[in-house]
Image (cartoon, grey):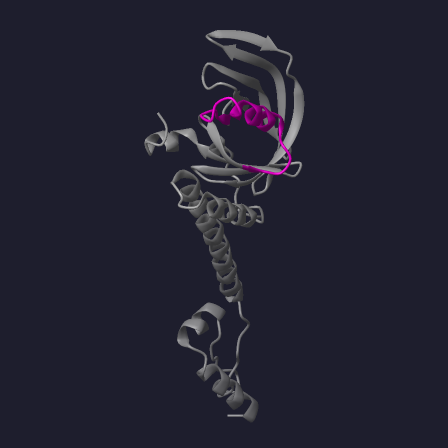
Amino acid sequence: MPAAAAAAAAVVAVVPQHLRRITGIHITPTSRGSAVVVTALPGLGKLFGGAGRNKDRQKRAKYTAAAEELLQLLTTQQASQQAANARANDLVEVLLTCEGLPFQEQLLGPGPWLVFFTKGSPQLWKATFSAGKLLNASNAASQDLDPGSRAVVNRAEYFGRRLYVTASGTYEPLDDDASSLPAAIQANISSGLLHVLGLDIPLPIKGTGQFEVVWLDTNLRVFRSSGAVSVQIRQQYLADAGLIG
C-alpha cells in the first residue's frame, strides 16, 4: 500500500464507526488494487445540522425556564416583595433578549390576559390602570386579543367591576409573514366605553399604537412598546389555579 494511502487508512481507522456513517468516511479499493480513498463527506450537513438544532433547543430551554420561573414568582406569595420584584426584573430582562423562536399567533387568545408586571414609561391603558389603583387595590388591567377576528379589547378598572374603561379595535402583525419572535404588532383602537354601575357610556378613544411580542407561551406573554414592558398572564390559567374568582 502506498505511503499516502496507508496514512489515510490510519486516519480513518481512528474515526469512530458512528461518525463514519454520519460523514460518509469509508475506505474504497481503487483500480490499482490496494490504495485507500477517503470519499467526499455528504453527511456533514447532518452533523452540523444536528449541532444547530441542539443549539436551538438549548436557547428555547433557557427562555422557557425563565418564563416558568417568572410565572411562579408573579403568582405565589413571596417572603420579600422587594427581592421578588428584583428577581422578576432580571427574568424579564432575559426574556427581552429572546430572538428567533417561533411566533405562534394563536397563543395570543382566547380570552383576556391580566397585567402582572410593568416597567418603563406608562402605556395608555397602563396609565389608566395606575390611576385607578389609587382608588382600589383590587383593580386590574387586561388585554384581550382574538387571533381569529384580530379584535382587541383593552380594559382598565378604576373601581373594580363597578367602574372601568374599555378600548376596542383591531390588531395586525406588521409583517404578514411574521413567524419568529419578536413579532411587531399594530393595534388600531376605534372606540371606547366607560362602564359604570351597569351603564355603558361612549368615550372618544381612538388611535394607533405599535408593540412587540417578545415572549409568548400558553400562560405568559411579554409585550414591549416604546420602552415600556408589560408581563401578562392568561386569565383562564389564574382561574384554573384558583388564584382569581
Q: Is residue 144 magenta?
A: yes
As drawn, is 176 to the left or to the right of 54? right
Q: Is residue 168 above or below residue 94?
A: above
Q: Is residue 42 above or below residue 136?
A: below
Write the residue at 56% across / 89% down.
Answer: 4
As drawn, is 181 to the left or to the right of 27? right
Residue 1 location, x and y as percent? 50, 92
Which stretch is magenta?
118-146
Q: Is residue 100 above or below residue 42?
A: above
Quarter of the image where one finds residue 165: top right
22 or 94, which lies in front?
A: 94
Q: Is residue 162 visible?
A: yes
206 or 197, which lies in front?
A: 197
Residue 108 location, x and y as percent? 49, 32
Quadrant the C terminus occupies: top left
Q: Is residue 194 above or below residue 244?
A: above
Q: Is residue 145 visible?
A: no
Residue 119 location, x and y as percent? 58, 39
Q: For the image shown, how many numbered marks are present on the structure?
A: 0
43 or 146, which lies in front?
A: 146
Write the residue at 32% across / 31% down.
Answer: 242
Write the residue at 64% across / 16% down.
Answer: 205
Residue 3 location, x and y as percent? 55, 93
Q: Is residue 139 magenta?
A: yes
236 or 121, which lies in front?
A: 121
